[in-house]
Image (cartoon, rainbow, N blue to C red):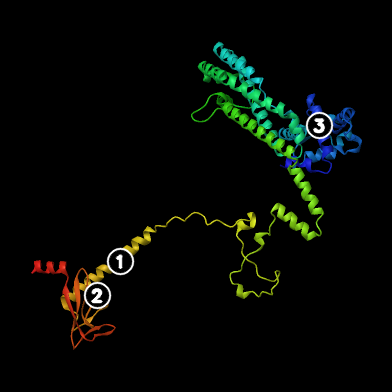
Amino acid sequence: MRLFNFTQRDDHVAYLWVLRAMNVLRAVHQLQVHPDDVASALNELAIAHDEVPSAADLNLRAMLDNLASDNEQVLYRVEDAARCGSLAAYRNRQSVYQFTEIGYRVYCAVEEVIGSRVQDANLSRLVFADILADFKALATANRDGDRDEVYRKLARLDSVLEDMTQRAARFYLTLNDVARTTDISPETFLRYKHALLAHMSEFTAELERYAPRLAEAVYEVEDSGVETLLERAAAVDERPMMRPSARLEDWRRRWLGLRQWFLADGPVETKAAQLQGATRTAISGVIALLRQVTEARRGGVSRTTQLRHLAAWAAAAPDEQAANALVSAAFDLRSVRHLSGAHDDDDQISPRTTWWDAPGVEINISLFRHGKRPAPGVPQPVRTRRGAHARLREQQLADRAADREAAKDLLDHGPHDRVLNEAETRAVLKLLTRALQARTVVAGRLRSGTGSSDVLTLRLVPNERGSRLRTETGTLHLPGFALEIKPHGAMRRRRTEKS
């Protein structure tokens, strides 16, 4: 982008005329120019154009140095000692300037933008006959082995179809601009509506008539040998800075682009069909726009008249507040939502605190930039955490194994007349909890309760003396109940089989 810096200078018009003078010298094959040569070219341009600045009023050397600086690099500067005819001239700087390749492209781009006109946009319908003739001549030249003719026809087809693509893109962009500006100049649209519709209809009809014939011509070229054709074109190609393999690959890419215009590859439409569909869509859009403009002119109401009426109402408002309210209602202007928000703890802020002294409130980025509340987003994926699950499973199996061992010790040694360890106490408390939850009450009195595991069964039996269990952390008293432990069903069968 630094190459376009000369268009942002205060005297950008003078810089543009200097580049135009250098382009005039370039057209006569004078690539390296002296500031005096540029001054002479400017004087010649001033004869045909009144707006050309005088060369005597410009510091041409400084301007050329700016264009050749490291920041812009539009020009390339070299020192030419051959211009020195004396020692004094040799001591002075004898710089000559020439366009860099990218600098000349920048200049051409600026000139193209300045010289573009809406009236130049068109669709080239007359070119289809020439394209068909070139395809047939290409097939004939390939069969005859004429390498020069193959190169000429293939290069011409590539340039013609590229030009048609650029013309179509520019035409539809211009048509879109016309559609957006019809409220400003409907007279221009109504003046040229018939010519515009006729132009697009004729192009569509011509493309539809030539499309199958052009497809057959492409098949005819392929039947003559595509690889041979590309090798012949690459052999005649006169670009010395490209290797033969690179030239062959470049022509293969160009041929694929030509082929895609008229032959479809799978479900993808040809470029000709896409262009035809875009033209039909544009015709429908123009007809709809024509109906809209006609109805608006018939009723006398358009966007222009609406804005004028609104401006008159705002000007006739009794005061500025009423005018602001009217315009806000017309354009749906509301308060800026990203400047308001609630603090997490409103009690900490006094209602008398000014906006300047109050603490800030965090605002979401989407609300700040776009004025929209943040979406909740898609659900987050479930995290399996297999490692944590495996560790929990191992811990659970270890706890169960410890409980089974403690239950077996209770069966073997009994709960009474000894001190229960921590694992045995935990096993007794689990079964006691189940027994108390499953207890039965008959006639207002607790009769019994049972709690079971896969090893043993604990039973609470009513007893006036009660019972007690001694543990490492204290004594557990069970008043009114005696505690009995018996093996569970599967464990009982195993003990019976062993005995």
Q: Is residue 237 visible?
A: no
Q: Is residue 381 above or below residue 435?
A: above
Q: How busy is the neighbourhood of tag 1: few (under 14 within 10 Å), some, or many (20 plus)?
A: few
Q: Secondary structure at mark 3?
A: helix
Nearer the observer: mark 3 or 1; the answer is: 1
Q: Position of residue 428 (x, y in %)?
A: 24, 77
Q: CA distance from mark 3 to mark 1?
A: 87 Å
Kind of residue at disc 2: Ala
Kind of residue at disc 1: Gln
Q: Residue furthest front?
A: 299
Q: Position of residue 373 (x, y in %)?
A: 59, 57
Name the N-terminal-most of marks 3 and 1: 3
Which residue matches tag 2? 438
Q: Secondary structure at mark 2?
A: loop
Which residue matches tag 3? 20
Which residue matches tag 1? 396
Q: Nearer the viewer, residue 479 or 453?
A: 479
Residue pictured at 78% horizontal, 25% vertical:
27
Q: Residue furthest left?
A: 499
